[in-house]
Image (spheres, rainbow, N blue to C red):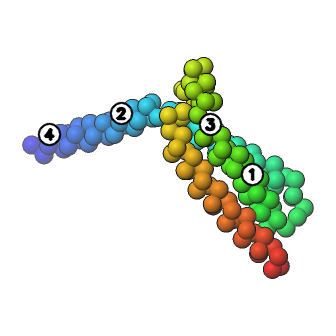
């Protein structure tokens, strides 16, 4: 009796885990353009930071942080404007690029890039203030 109730519990736990996995797979499949855009965005930021770290490797750490966040700030300020170009998105949608870029969620990503601009601005300013104090 106990072993059969344990196996039933194990089966229900496995079913619940599979349902969660199935839901996650469905969610990821439905939002693959958001995931791809996010991954591309993260990779671009990492490349920008790596380039600034390499270029200013002989400077102090606060200069490197300030320059890296400033470079990401330049990129994000240009990107925030691109996310409002409706005619360009209509053209990209007609070319079939909606599988890679989240063309229907541009307002959401516009807000997200705005928050990134705020974060990088604070980091950039604080790094310069701390560097000035040293």
> Which quadrant of the figure contains the C terminus?
bottom right
Which disc number belongs to residue 22?
Answer: 2
Q: Which residue is depicted at the point 13% across and 46% down?
A: 2
Pair 2/3: label in front: 3
Assign a secondary structure to mark 2. helix
User: What residue did someone put label 1 on?
Assistant: 74
Residue 102 percent location from the top left of the image? 54, 34
Tell us which disc is closer to us: 1 or 2.
Answer: 1
In the image, farthest residue toward the top: 95
Which circle, 4 or 2, is nearer the viewer?
2
Which one is earlier in the sequence, the residue at label 1 or at label 4?
4
Find residue 17 and report its horizontal and vertical position in percent: 32, 40
The residue furthest right is 58
Label 2 neighbour load within 10 Å: few <14, some 14-19, many 20+: few
Sequence-first tag of 2 and 3: 2
Mark 3: which secondary structure? loop
Q: Is residue 90 visible?
A: yes
Quadrant including the N terminus: top left
In the rendered structure, are the residues bearing label 3 and label 1 in contact, judged by CB atoms less than 8 Å apart? Answer: no
Residue underneath mark 4: 4
Mark with earlier residue (4, 2): 4
Residue 98's place in the image compared with 105, above or below, is: above
How far is mark 1 from mark 4, CA to CA?
Answer: 63 Å
The numbered mark, 3 or 4, whose residue comes first in the sequence reads 4
Q: Nearer the viewer, mark 1 or mark 4?
A: 1
Residue 119: image quadrant is: bottom right
Front one among 57 and 87: 87
Q: How many marks?
A: 4
Give the residue drawn at x 76%, y 48%. 48
């Amino acid at each position: 009796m106990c072993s059969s109730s344990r196996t039933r519990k194990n089966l229900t736990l496995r079913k619940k885990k599979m349902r969660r996995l199935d839901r996650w797979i469905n969610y990821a499949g439905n939002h693959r353009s958001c995931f791809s855009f996010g991954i591309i965005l993260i990779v671009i930021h990492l490349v920008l930071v790596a380039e600034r770290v390499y270029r200013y490797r002989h400077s102090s750490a606060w200069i490197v942080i300030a320059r890296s966040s400033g470079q990401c700030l330049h990129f994000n300020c240009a990107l925030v404007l691109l996310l409002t170009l409706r005619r360009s998105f209509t053209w990209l949608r007609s070319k079939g690029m909606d599988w890679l870029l989240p063309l229907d969620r541009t307002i959401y990503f516009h807000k997200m890039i705005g928050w990134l601009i705020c974060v990088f601005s604070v980091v950039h300013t604080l790094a310069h203030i701390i560097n000035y104090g040293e």
